[in-house]
């Protein structure tokens, strides 16, 4: 993306850095609308395999329906719990 769309990469770079920090600290990444205008997002990489790839699960929500702090306090942890249950149910296939 950096070479194909440098303007977009420059716009998203601070959000990417923040998402990576949140991923390391809390186990999920957040997006406050910088990658997809008008949508918040929470996501994480599971241990479930699909061929040679890991399954990534995410959700998005309109900023009119939640506040940024809810992404960290409620939505992210609930997604982590959902992914953990999926991992247990599939034995990390």
Image: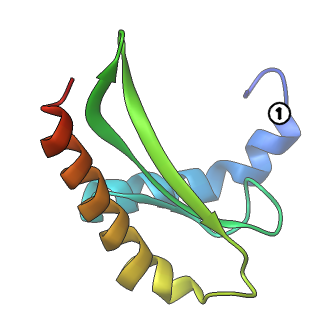
Q: Nearer the viewer, residue 76 or 22?
A: 76
Is 68 displayed left or right of 19 in the figure? Answer: right
Q: Nearer the viewer, residue 93 or 37?
A: 93
Q: Does residue 68 sit above or below 80 in this rendering?
A: below
Task: State which quadrant residue 27 falls in.
Answer: bottom left
Is 70 displayed left or right of 84 in the figure? Answer: right
Circle 1: is it few (<14), some (14-19), or many (20+) Cα within 10 Å? few
Task: State which quadrant residue 66 falls in.
Answer: bottom right
Is 42 displayed left or right of 40 in the figure? Answer: left
Identified at 76% across, 46% down, the residue is 10
Q: Residue furthest front?
A: 89
Q: Residue furthest top?
A: 52
Image quarter where the N terminus lies is: top right
Image quarter where the C terminus lies is: top left
Colouring scheme, one of rainbow, by chain, secondary structure, one colour = rainbow
Identified at 78% across, 52% down, the residue is 11
Q: Does residue 8 sit above or below 6 in this rendering?
A: below
Q: Position of residue 24 (x, y in %)?
A: 28, 54
Read off the residue under disc 1. 6
Q: Position of residue 69 (x, y in %)?
A: 49, 87
Q: Nearer the viewer, residue 9 or 90?
A: 90
């Amino acid at each position: 993306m950096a070479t194909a769309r440098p303007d977009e990469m420059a716009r998203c770079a601070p959000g990417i850095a923040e998402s990576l920090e949140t991923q390391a600290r809390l186990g999920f990444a957040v997006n406050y609308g910088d990658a997809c205008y008008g949508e918040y997002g929470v996501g994480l990489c599971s241990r479930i395999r699909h061929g040679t790839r890991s399954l990534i699960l995410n959700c998005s929500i309109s900023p009119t329906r939640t506040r940024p702090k809810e992404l960290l306090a409620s939505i992210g942890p609930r997604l982590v719990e959902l992914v953990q249950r999926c991992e247990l149910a599939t034995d990390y296939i």
